């Protein structure tokens, strides 16, 4: 049986990246969280030593995701991103950066985040967002550019392209 | 700047929901569970708690299924969204855990309650439709998925991950897993008038009836104006259609 302290450290380090990794398989936030929780519970009960805990955790999460997908009738349980299937390595590799970006989005002030999500995720125009939220177009533009700025500070590797994108 | 960065960005924003993947809360849940187990002298307490939790989870995870057999049937979902099922359609969802995520088969018209913070998602065997608040119809079977929007805006994504934004009056269907725009149309092929009227009633939210129910209609109509469609049918079949 492992020490609580050790588990807690691992949990704080890998919880979010593993959730993002699971999300690539399951596509559903709640299911991803369940898979990661179960994997940590299993790690806690693990009696024998494992060589790389990180690799063990990723494998545990992957197996749970594949089980879940098979049970729901999917014959080829592959991870995917917004554009389609990707490799397992790719999903694992991206998960760390995605976790940082997720954290940065989480930390945004409410209004900035809503504007950003409506623009990028829902594909609404500045005008439509302004109407929806009862703001001026100028304010919406401001919220979005501030949001992108904070995201860039929060995860500098990723965000260089966003400025060209918007 | 590279392509992977962009993919990481859209993946995170597409799935982001406030308050999820919360490491602190998740840790408390996990460690709380463990502590409960180590309390030997009070073993009954964790057992009772686990039972209550189990009951709660089975209640929370419960699935609700709606079916329409030979008539058009309307159901109101937990969030107030109205789903009108054409005959032979099935809709399933988890009212407590995920009230705005439904999966379906058949043909269903949705009148979605507006809630920008919680997009409404329809999963069909081969595609997903995401909306903010709108009226739209999804037709999904083994041959494919087709979406027609009558109000608002939806995002339609295929299994290949490509997606399209559709607005009022627009329609699209899947071709090899990729959503492709189409003019919104009704297609009938020697369809009994009774069924034609049922379908139009559902789509336009009116009640249509006629005495000549056995007459059959073949043709394609764009979803623009109901009166125009009715005029065309009446003159093609030489029947009277009553609208209420």
Image: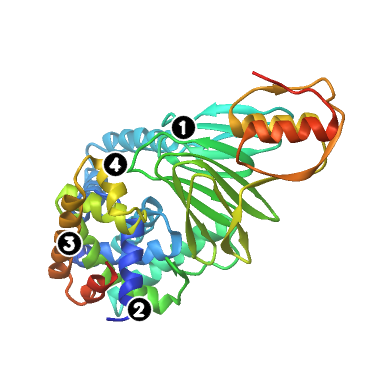
Q: Which mark is residue B3?
A: 2
Co-location on one chain, circles 1 and 3: no
Q: Which mark is residue B206?
A: none
Label 1: which secondary element: loop
At horizontal 46% and vertical 49% (from top left) the residue drawn is B154
Say which of marks 4 and 1 sits in front. 4
In the image, residue A76 lies at what x, y percent? 57, 68
Residue that label 3 marks:
A145
Q: Tag 4, which chain?
A: A
Residue that label 4 marks:
A132
Q: Nearer the viewer, residue B163 or A11?
A: B163
Q: Are marks 1 and 3 in contact (CB under 8 Å)?
A: no
As measured in the structure, the alpha-carbon distance from the residue carrying label 4 to the one carrying label 3 is: 18 Å
As measured in the structure, the alpha-carbon distance from the residue carrying label 4 to the one carrying label 2 is: 31 Å
Colour scheme employed for the rendering of this structure: rainbow
Residue that label 1 marks:
B81
Q: Which is more N-terminal, label 1 or label 2?
A: 2
In the image, residue B47 lies at what x, y percent? 33, 37
Label 2: which secondary element: helix
As measured in the structure, the alpha-carbon distance from the residue carrying label 4 to the one carrying label 1 is: 19 Å
Co-location on one chain, circles 4 and 3: yes
Say which of marks 4 and 2 sits in front. 4
As measured in the structure, the alpha-carbon distance from the residue carrying label 2 to the one carrying label 1 is: 38 Å
- Say which quarter of the image contains residue B196: top right
Q: Tag 2, which chain?
A: B
């Amino acid at each position: 049986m492992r020490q609580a302290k050790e588990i807690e450290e691992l949990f704080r380090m890998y919880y979010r990246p593993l959730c993002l990794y699971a999300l690539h398989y399951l596509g559903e936030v709640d299911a991803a969280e369940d898979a990661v929780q179960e994997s940590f519970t299993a790690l806690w009960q693990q009696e024998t030593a494992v060589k790389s805990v990180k690799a063990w955790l990723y494998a545990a999460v992957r197996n749970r995701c594949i089980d879940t997908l098979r049970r729901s009738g999917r014959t080829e349980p592959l991870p995917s991103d917004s554009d389609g299937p990707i490799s397992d390595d790719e999903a694992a590799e991206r998960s760390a950066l995605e976790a940082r970006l997720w954290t940065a989005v989480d930390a945004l002030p409410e209004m900035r985040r809503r504007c950003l999500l409506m623009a990028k995720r829902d594909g609404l125009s500045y005008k439509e967002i302004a109407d929806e939220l009862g703001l001026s177009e100028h304010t919406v533009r401001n919220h979005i550019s501030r949001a992108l700025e904070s995201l860039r500070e929060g995860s500098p590797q990723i965000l260089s392209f966003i400025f060209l994108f918007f | 700047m590279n392509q992977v960065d962009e993919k990481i960005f859209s993946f995170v924003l597409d799935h982001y929901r406030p308050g999820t993947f919360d490491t602190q809360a998740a840790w408390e849940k996990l460690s709380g569970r463990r502590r409960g187990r180590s309390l030997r002298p009070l073993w009954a307490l964790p057992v009772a708690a686990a039972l209550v939790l189990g009951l709660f989870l089975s209640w929370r995870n419960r699935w609700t299924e709606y079916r329409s057999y030979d008539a058009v049937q309307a159901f109101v979902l937990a969030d107030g969204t109205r789903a009108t099922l054409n005959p032979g359609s099935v809709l399933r969802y988890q009212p407590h855990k995920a009230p705005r995520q439904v999966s379906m088969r058949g043909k269903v018209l949705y009148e979605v309650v507006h809630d920008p913070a919680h997009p409404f998602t329809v999963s069909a065997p081969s595609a997903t439709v995401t909306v903010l608040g709108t009226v739209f119809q999804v037709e999904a079977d083994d041959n494919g998925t087709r979406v027609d929007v009558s109000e608002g805006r939806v995002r339609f994504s295929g299994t290949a991950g490509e997606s399209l934004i559709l607005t009022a009056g627009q329609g699209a269907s899947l071709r090899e897993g990729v959503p492709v725009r189409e003019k919104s149309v009704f297609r009938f092929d020697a369809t009994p008038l009774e069924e034609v009227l049922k379908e139009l009633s559902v789509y336009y939210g009116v009640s249509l009836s006629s005495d000549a129910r056995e007459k059959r209609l073949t043709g394609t109509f764009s979803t623009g104006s109901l009166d125009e469609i009715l005029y065309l049918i009446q003159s093609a079949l030489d029947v009277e259609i009553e609208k209420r």
